Amino acid sequence: MKRLILEMGTGNDLYGEDYTKAAKRAVQDALHHSSLVLFRSLDLPHEKMQVNVTIGVQKPDKVDTDAVAATLPRGRAKVTVVKGGLDVVDKDVNTVSVIATAAVEACYDIKPEDWQLS
C-alpha cells in the first residue's frame, strides 16, 4: 500500500469532555480539506482504498474507534489512537475542553512501475 494523500484536522468538545466527539470532529475537519478526485480521475475503486486514521488525544482509551471509523465515507478504515491533543482545564468551573488532532491517510495498492509522469 502506498500513501497517496495525507490530511490533518483538529476537533474539539468544549463542554462534554467527550473524546470520541472531538476525534470525529477532527476527522471531519481533515476530510473537508481534501477532495479525492484522483480516484475518480484514474478510475480507482474507493472500496480498495485503505484509510489510516491516527487520532491524538490526552486520554486515548476514551475514544470509540468504531464510531470514528463509521464517519469515513469511503474506503476500509483503520483507526489508531495515541496520546496527543490537548485538554484545557478551567479550574474555576471544573470543566475540561478536549482538543483532538487527526491525520487521515488514503492508501492504495499501486505499483510504481505502472505510473509515469509526462
Image (cartoon, helix red, strand yellow):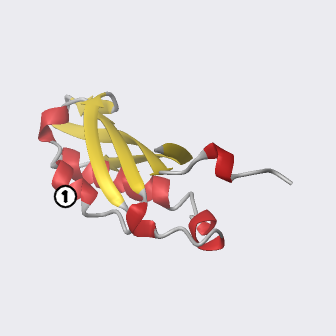
In screen coordinates, is 12 left or right of 49? left
Q: In which quadrant of the rendered view does residue 87 lie?
A: top left
> Percent from the top left, x then y, of residue 51?
39, 52
Q: Can residue 62 be seen here?
A: yes
Q: Is residue 3 above or below residue 60?
A: below
Please give the residue where the numbered disc 1 appears in the rendered image: 67
In screen coordinates, is 49 left or right of 87? right
Q: Is residue 110 above or below residue 97?
A: below
Q: Residue at x 40, y 59 (%)?
A: 28
Most distant residue in the front direction: 113
Q: Is residue 62 above or below residue 106?
A: above
Q: Residues within 10 Å of mark 1 (few under 14, many from 20)?
A: some
> Percent from the top left, x then y, of residue 113?
67, 46
Q: Nearer the viewer, residue 91 or 40?
A: 40
Q: Nearer the viewer, residue 8 or 10?
A: 8
> Percent from the top left, x then y, of residue 98?
27, 40
Amino acid tagged 1 = Ala
User: Which quadrant is the C terminus positioned in?
Assistant: bottom right
In screen coordinates, is 75 left or right of 80? right
Q: Residue at x 62, y 68 (%)?
A: 37
Number of residue marks: 1
Q: Residue at x 17, y 44 (%)?
A: 63
Q: Residue at x 17, y 55 (%)?
A: 66
> Percent from the top left, x then y, of residue 65?
19, 49
User: Element under label 1?
Assistant: helix
